[in-house]
Amino acid sequence: EISRRIHEKTEHLATVESLQNGKPYRETSTIDVPQAANQFKYFASVLTTDEGSVNEIDQNTMSLVVNEPVGVVGAVVAWNFPILLASWKLGPALAAGNTVVIQPSSSTPLSLIELAKIFQEVLPKGVVNVLTGKGSESGDAIFHHEGV
């Protein structure tokens, strides 16, 4: 659902991002935003196919891989590819069942704020949280918080 909504709002998201960081609209609308949508689609498909594994290491040792959420994931996104970089962090974290606190660059926060509107439409409240502000303050708050 997230992927579909991003595709539907490609023009708007690309416009916001291009106006914010000066990147050519053509590049943002044909590469960055569609690739971000594809990230969410990919990780949603992984969610339905990857169930973990059991491997025999040697006759006395077995390895068990269980996929389960780790809790709250903290993420910081740079200014140059805000929507695409956010998708690289949000896609796997959400597919694994985690909640996320994500901080956009203070020079390009609007892209992530617009992307977050899509999450508000399709995810329960509090699953994705956007924390804006100066990186040395809000980014540090994410990195040093015991719950993240």
Image (cartoon, rainbow, N blue to C red):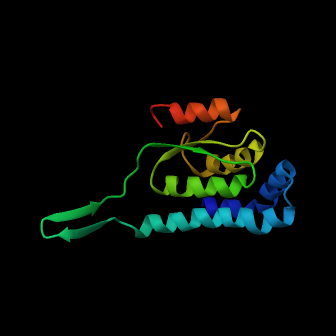
Residue 77 picture location, percent across and down: 66, 47
Residue 124 picture location, percent across and down: 54, 45
Tell me what residue is drawn at x 74 percent, y 48 percent.
79
| Nearest the eye: 81 or 113 | 81
Q: Is residue 147 left or right of residue 86?
A: left
Tell me what residue is drawn at x 43 percent, y 67 percent.
48
Q: Is residue 47 left or right of residue 58?
A: right
Query: What is the quadrant of the N terminus in the image?
Result: bottom right
Tell me what residue is drawn at x 86 percent, y 61 percent.
24
Number of callouts: 0
Q: Is residue 131 left or right of residue 16?
A: left
Residue 69 picture location, percent across and down: 40, 50
Q: Is residue 69 left or right of residue 16?
A: left
Residue 45 picture location, percent across and down: 50, 68
Tell me what residue is drawn at x 20 percent, y 64 percent.
62
Q: Residue furthest left?
A: 60
